[in-house]
Image (tube, helix red, strand yellow):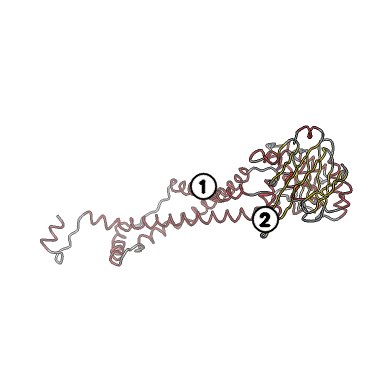
């Protein structure tokens, strides 16, 4: 793979990307020789049924898991070669994750959950706190809820906090894994609108979903089946 | 000289006692108490170390999701290990303080008990001799006052911190192996 491809506007490029898991004596081909190119600044939907490999692909892009083989380049970084401090730095600076289960730290307030990635990246103090408040307002969380712990927030509010946390270090890619699966339809729509609003010149949003309606709002759709991308629409 | 006297006069007629044998009788219960305390300390150290080790291991497993989330949002292994280390050290120090405060009032009673009982008699004869010594020397020793010096207190704290450091080795190894995707997938 060549860097000129990145310069030509692709933020993520994969060739022959593979991730298999042993499971109950057999091998699950979660991601099975996937090729794709994702343009910068777009909202991309990874669509397919449960177990087709969407989440695994997001985890590979986010360096939460390591591919078995193939190439994966994200914003100029060869993700397959990441390890140790470079892998940690990549997770801090390059990607922001939004999970289906929200995955907030229960002992921390909404504000503290958002400042956490900043503190981990070495940005401490008042500045990070002010920025976190600003992000929480940006995602539509009332000021009165900033100091509440996740248990005292609704599902939609928790997901807003999770989105603010994903934005904390201003990463170029937001990865959202079934972000509306645990929300009612109205709240889910608001969350998708929020994610849509985040994409722009410098930020790409990749959403894993099985929801056709959400996929229809994306700029491009990669349809997955049995660990492979079977169709790409929208360029 | 004592041996000569015993041989010449006969042990059935006189009881020959030397200064050394008197001292030995007086200090035998103290030596015995010291040995018992030492064994007790070592056993307690091993037991508490094992308890802390297993407790921290269990806590790390229970908090595996939190570890996965922290690593997913950019925490390094050292950050997570450090967090566990600080928590373990904090708990160990608090436990050491509570243990020390609870032990101070009991120390005198434990010492009295060790001095007045034949706790480590190897055989019947030695046990009886120790009992006899303790009974007889009880008056000579009077009341043995147990003074817990600041050095002993600092030793206890140092041991607690040492145990905490050792106890973080297991979670450190565990945290290093955690892949966030694997944890979050299964939780």
Q: Nearer the viewer, residue B25 or A13?
A: A13
Q: Quadrant of residue A198?
A: top right
Residue picked out by circle 1? B161
Identified at 89% across, 47% down, the residue is A217
Pick the front one: B116 or A183: A183
Q: Residue at x 16, y 57 (%)?
A: B2
- In the rendered structure, the answer to whether residue B136 lies left or right of residue B156 reads left
The reply to whether callout 1 and callout 2 are in contact (CB within 8 Å) is no
Element at label 2: strand
Q: Quadrant of residue A154?
A: bottom right
At label 1, counting other C-alpha atoms closer than 10 Å, the crowd grade (few under 14, some 14-19, many 20 or more) is many
Q: Nearer the viewer, residue B180 or B163?
A: B180
> Where, quadrant-wise, is the N terminus of chain A in this rendering?
top right
- On the rendered structure, is A77 left or right of B104? right
Residue A10 place in picture, x, y as percent: 80, 37
Q: Give the image location of residue B51, x and y in percent.
A: 53, 57
Label 1 is found on which chain of the structure? B
Q: Mark 2 = which residue?
A: A22
Chain letter of mark 2 equals A
Question: Residue B127, how many percent across, how many down?
Answer: 31, 65
Quarter occupied by residue A235: top right
Report, in whole angstroms, how far the alpha carbon at label 1 lies from the one at label 2.
Answer: 41 Å
Question: In the depicted view, which residue is nearer to us: A91 or B126?
Answer: A91
């Amino acid at each position: 793979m060549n860097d000129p491809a990145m310069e030509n506007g692709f933020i993520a490029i994969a060739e022959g990307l593979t991730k298999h898991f042993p499971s109950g004596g057999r091998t699950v081909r979660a991601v099975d020789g996937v090729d794709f190119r994702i343009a910068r600044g777009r909202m991309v939907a990874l669509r397919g049924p449960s177990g087709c490999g969407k989440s695994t692909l997001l985890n590979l892009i986010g360096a939460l898991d390591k591919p078995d083989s193939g190439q994966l380049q994200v914003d100029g970084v060869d993700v397959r070669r990441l390890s140790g401090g470079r892998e940690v730095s990549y997770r801090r600076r390059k990607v922001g994750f939004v999970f289906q289960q929200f995955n907030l730290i229960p002992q921390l307030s909404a504000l503290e959950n958002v400042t956490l990635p900043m503190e981990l990246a070495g940005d401490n103090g008042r500045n990070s706190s002010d920025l976190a408040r600003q992000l929480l307002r940006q995602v539509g969380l009332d000021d009165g809820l900033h100091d509440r712990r996740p248990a005292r927030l609704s599902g939609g509010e928790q997901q807003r906090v999770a989105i603010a946390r994903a934005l904390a270090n201003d990463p170029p890619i937001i990865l959202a894994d079934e972000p509306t699966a645990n929300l009612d339809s109205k709240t889910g729509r608001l969350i998708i609108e929020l994610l849509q609003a985040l994409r722009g010149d410098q930020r790409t949003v990749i959403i894993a979903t099985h929801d056709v309606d959400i996929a229809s709002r994306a700029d491009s759709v990669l349809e997955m089946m049995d660990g492979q991308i079977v169709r790409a629409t929208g360029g | 000289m004592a041996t000569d006297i015993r041989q010449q006069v006969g042990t059935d007629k006189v009881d020959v006692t030397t200064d050394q044998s008197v001292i030995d009788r007086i200090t035998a219960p103290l030596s015995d108490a010291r040995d018992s305390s030492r064994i007790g300390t070592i056993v307690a150290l091993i037991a508490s170390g094992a308890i802390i080790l297993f407790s921290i291991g269990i806590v790390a497993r229970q908090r595996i999701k939190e570890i996965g989330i922290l690593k997913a949002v950019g925490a390094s292994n050292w950050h997570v290990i450090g967090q566990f280390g600080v928590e373990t050290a904090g708990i160990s120090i608090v436990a050491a303080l509570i243990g020390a405060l609870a032990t101070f009032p009991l120390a005198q009673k434990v010492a009295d008990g060790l001095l007045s009982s034949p706790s480590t008699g190897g055989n019947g004869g030695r046990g009886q001799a120790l009992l006899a010594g303790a009974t007889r020397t009880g008056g000579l020793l009077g009341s043995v006052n147990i003074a817990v010096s600041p050095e002993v207190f600092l030793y206890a704290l140092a041991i607690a911190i040492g145990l905490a450091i050792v106890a973080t080795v297991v979670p450190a190894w565990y945290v290093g192996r955690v892949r966030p995707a694997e944890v979050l997938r299964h939780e």
